Image (cartoon, helix red, strand yellow):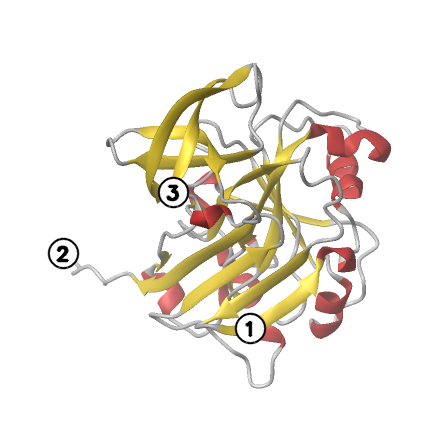
Amino acid sequence: MSSFTRLIRFLAKDGKTYYGDAILSPGVTDLASATQARVVKGDIFGRHDVSDQVADVRLLLAPLAREDAKTVRCLGLNYEQHAKESKVPVPKYPVLFYKPVTALAGPFDDIPVAAPAQEAEGLDYECELVAIIGKEARDVPESQALDYVLGYAIGNDVSHREWQLKRGGGQWALGKGFDGWAPYGPGIVSSRLIKDPQSLKISTKLNGKTVQDSSTRDMIFGVASMISFLSQGTTLLPGDVIFTGTPQGVGMGRSPPLWLKEGDVVEVNLEGVGSCANTVKYAKSKPRL
């Protein structure tokens, strides 16, 4: 049996949804360019096989099906330069918050902006390396932590600073947890291919212009460190999704602030994984009865 190296979940041209191992041209690493994949059969977290069945990709979907995605953990202020632009001390411990699983979305889905998030400015972008847990982990030492990673993706921790910092009662979840505010993908690159998650280029483009450009080496708490920390006394499950923080260059840190508006296209990229491109779309208000 062979296991996947570049896992994608996709709607095929035959109308069916599959997990598959992306087929890429030599030298190509961006999973967003995949047009075909070998269908994966079995449990992606356990015994599975990359079959000889090749399916044509019609649309890339969120890398994990809703039933396979578990807790969505996020780290705040985890890049040194981002902490500085936010004018806060470098944290001594990881700053943890959660998003609902309904925040997860696909690599090309629109970013839906619900009516409450349209009441004030403050919509922001955050490119983030996303680690997906592949097997149950508890009290894991840092030296073994990466063994529990299924693979890596790129994500956008979409945030509304007004709701995050002023209307949330001190909690960040209201400003980060709206439906569709955690697009990620375009697939999951196996940790067998990405052996060092702390040496990857990470960036954001807004309407084609680069607004974030950094490296995961600027993380305060690296992936192994955070997984070990998060597993102390708390069991991490296969399918847990961890957004690992954003580098400097967010809209909030600029003068004047650079807020997202309807129609903006946000493209986040991670070296060795690829890109997600999502368009901001305001929800239309419904008439009150």
Disc 2 target residue: 289
* Crowd class of label 1 (few under 14; some 14 to 19; many from 20; radius 10 Å): some
Choose between 202 and 120: the one closer to the eye. Answer: 202
Residue 35's mark? 3
223 vs 189, left or right, is right
Amino acid tagged 2: Leu
> Which of the two discs, 1 and 2, labels the residue nearer the N terminus?
1
> Which of the two discs, 2 and 3, labels the residue nearer the N terminus?
3
Q: Distance between the residues labelled 2 and 3?
A: 46 Å
Is residue 205 visible in the rendered image? The answer is yes
> Which of the two discs, 1 and 3, labels the residue nearer the N terminus?
3
* Crowd class of label 2 (few under 14; some 14 to 19; many from 20; radius 10 Å): few
Q: Distance between the residues labelled 1 and 2?
A: 44 Å
Q: Name the image quarter holding residue 84.
A: bottom right
Residue 231, x across and y down, in percent: 74, 31
Q: How far apart are marks 1 and 3 (CA)?
A: 26 Å
Residue 210's mark? 1
Amino acid tagged 3: Thr
Q: Name the image quarter holding residue 269.
A: bottom right
**What residue is drawn where x is 52% and y is 17%?**
48
